Amino acid sequence: MLHRRLYRQVILNIIFFTILMIVFFNSWALDSDKYQVMHIVSDTATYNRDQHTIIYEGNVQADQGSSKIDGDKLIVYQNSDDKNKIKQIIIFGEPAHYSSLPEADKPRLFVEALKITYDPNLKTVLLEGHGKVSQDGNIFSGPHIWYDMVNGVVHSLTDKNIKGNERTEMIIQPQESAPKK
């Protein structure tokens, strides 16, 4: 009986955390952030008009509303049309970090990996190398974490080419505190 209750609780926790992760990724930032000015500072910046890229290197920090990014190198790929719309953003670091407020009344969301790739057209995010997403004590980590925002699919996998045994891990905080004695 106790075994069944424990098993059911574990399943409910996994379902809750999966839903929580979908909510996290679907709303990585406040809606108002996209209307805020983006401020980027770095040691160097290189704009290549022919390759439609902007490369920021050395202590890169970018802020836009509640969203913050920092790392060693940030590459912005733009479409080749006249509008130069962003095609992809990649940030590298040891690790690179992203944080944001998903909603005004929710705890801050923290993301880190050696390489974070965001594709706004495909609406995908890829965390490569020690990927970690955390919010309010809940943690989802793995060597490679891929998120498809359109379909709400989160996939974590091990890179067979990298030595070591880093695996996917979830830490889920209890929904209720323990009863007082």
Image (cartoon, rainbow, N blue to C red):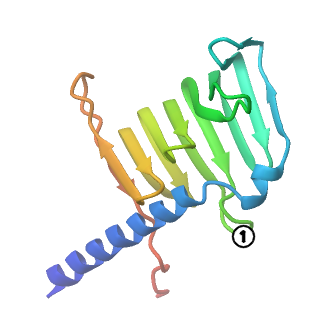
Residue ID at (22%, 84%) = 5
Q: In terms of depth relative to the viewer, which is nearer, 2 or 163? A: 163
* Residue 28: % across, % down: 61, 54
Hey, which quadrant is residue 94 in on the image? top right
Q: Which residue type does callout 1 highlight?
A: Asp
Q: Is residue 31 above or below residue 156?
A: below
Q: Give the number of callouts.
A: 1
Residue ID at (62%, 29%) = 79
Q: In terms of depth relative to the viewer, which is nearer, 44 or 129? A: 44
Q: Which quarter of the rendering shows the N terminus?
A: bottom left
| Residue 41 appears left or right of 108 | right
Residue ID at (40%, 72%) = 16
Q: Is residue 118 above or below residue 52?
A: below
* Residue 147: % across, % down: 43, 49
Pointer 1 residue: 105
Query: Regarding mark 1 in the picture, which secondary structure is present there?
Result: loop
Residue ID at (59%, 33%) = 87
* Residue 92: % across, % down: 56, 24
* Residue 29: % across, % down: 67, 55
Mark 1 neighbour class, 10 Å CA radius: few under 14, some 14 to 19, many 20 or more:
few
Q: Is residue 149 above or below residue 129?
A: below
